[in-house]
Amino acid sequence: MFSVRARGRRGHQGEWRGGVSGSEFRFKLQTQGETSAREQPDQARAQMQYRVTVSAHDSNPVSVQLSSSWAKQQEEARHSLLRIVSSVQYLARQGQALRGKSGSGNLEQLLKLRSEDDPVLKKWLTRTTNYTSCHAQNEILNVMANTVIHDIANTIRSLPILQFSIIVDGTQDISGAEQESICLRYVDHDLVPHEEFIGLYVVSEMTGQAIADMATDVLVRLNLPIAGLRGQGYDGAANMAGKYSGAQAILRRQQPLALYVHCGARCSNLITQAACSASPLIRDSLFWVHQLGVLFGQSGKFKAMFADIATTDNQPEPMTTLKPLCPTRWTVWDTAIKAVLTQYDRVLCSLDKMAGSTSKSAASASGLAEHFKKSKTVLGLTLASAVVGELECLNKSLQRRTQTVSGMLAAVDCVRSSFQEKQNDQHYVTLFEKANAAVVESAQIQPIEVPNAKCFPGEAVDYYRVEFFKVLDTVDAQFAERFDQESFKDLQKLENMLLTGQVDDVVDQYPELKRGALAVELPLFKSKYEFSCSKEAAEVLRELPVEVQGLFEQVEALVRLLLVVPASSCEAERSFSALRRLKTWLRATMSQE
């Protein structure tokens, strides 16, 4: 270190300190002088940069820069949120669970996969608040659900004539809560019927008043006036179909034009059950088929034995799964019966092999083998297949969403007339000989005989004739009872108006129908075009030019009225399958929302 002191005018610089020599001191002073000379251009350059920066700030102020940055952040947030929403929509549409264990949820994994090609989304997912929490997921789902439901309600309100029907059915979920499914049926601008699921609702009690209040509340929330209600589709339970205190009666007191229709597919299923229960021969045979299906589903060992026998035998028929007779699936009985009849020898061999094993199901297999070796089981299944097959064809036809009441009645008349034609000895003898031929071909089945020859000295073909005709009589009586509903009379009058061109007094009950205009339009429409039902009339109107359609506004209103009344409540039944997939044993505590 050194210090310098000036002394007098001579400017003499005095003593040195710190052991620095004079030459070193002069060098340092010279170096400092050169450095100060070089700093002058640097200062000028800094001043120039400052002036440029100030000028740039004047043309692009800080507020503008902050606004641009904020807009960019908003754009990135909007982009990422749309990706999250679309991912939630995809999983919800496919019926997949969104959440899972930490890091293994479907939504989280899907977003990670999508972020590999999306750097903006990848950066967004690293944020603490990224709108993927359970609360954000539920909010997105609620917004989607409300949007779908409101779109359906807006579509109904935008129709040229406000007409709609309500379909209600109930079931219990996994937790035991009674869930009521509500659907709406309407006819769009192209005269095509639609049935749309609205939601599942919990009622405090299963009375007709509670269910009617729930249906009314749903209509109020959707801003659908009950004045436009034209039909009701329920099952035949007392709380739904009761004449005085049922839900349909309570709603009809509010809107008398809301015609109640007992689900046609359910009526067909009830006819099938009544017919099969009328004959002990058919009833017992179907019971053994059901028990065989249960054994096949519960015993993996029996299933493996059956598969091994099916692969080693020389029968041309491929192996078919043996199924039980499910009481809630209405179109599987005929399939289960035919699966047994076409594989009867395989069934007997598998049961005998299973009965000789040490399995816990060996006793059940032994009992089933004993019953299937009886010829009356083969005869009962042959007679049952002739009855159940046509009833299930009718049931499938009535489950379509576009089915109308007039179409349902036409299909019922077709099947009913077919059963009436079978009430002759020739048809029965043909079925008996078919069963007898199957018995003769199999060496393990006993021949068909009269159970008690002392009580009935005749032949077996005469003994079992009574059983078959008893079933046919039950089917005919059930058709007359199940499909003779009060609401069908008014609908039949409206249908006759369309087909004959003559106006009936029932028109005065409906405010959307004008007697004077119909008296002019119906004869003109009938003379120009050919149709045999309301569905064909709708197809004719759909193909007409807009100018020509304007000539038949009242005819279109009449056709809409005939199409909007539901023929079945199967749309509500279909929602139960979705409920079963949604609320499983692992999610039994899921809230109603």
Image (tube, rainbow, N blue to C red):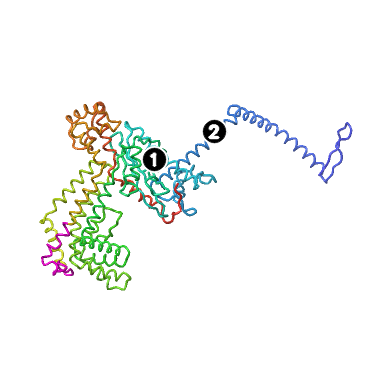
Residue at 48%, 41% (x, y): give it: 81
- Tell me where residue 542 appears, x and y as whole percent: 25, 33
Indicate the amino acid at tag 2.
Answer: Ser
Structural distance between the alpha carbons of marks 2 and 1: 51 Å
- Residue that mark 1 sits on: 216
- Tell me where residue 28 appears, x and y as whole percent: 77, 40
Range covered by the magenta-colored residues: 443-469
Taking the magenta stretch, the answer to whether it contains residue 247 is no
Q: Dot 1, how many residues are within 10 Å of its Cα: few (below 14), some (14-19), or many (20+)?
A: some
The reply to whether dot 2 and dot 1 touch (C-beta < 8 Å) is no
- Tell me where residue 77 appears, x and y as whole percent: 50, 39
Taking the magenta stretch, the answer to whether it contains residue 447 is yes
| Element type at mark 1 | helix
Q: Earlier in the sequence, mark 2 or mark 1?
A: 2
Which is more toward the observer, 206 or 419?
206
Is 431 on the left or on the right of 2, as rendered?
left
- Determine the main secondary structure of the stretch shown in magenta: loop
Residue that lies at the very extreme toward the right in this rendered image: 8
- Residue that mark 2 sits on: 68
| Element type at mark 2 | helix
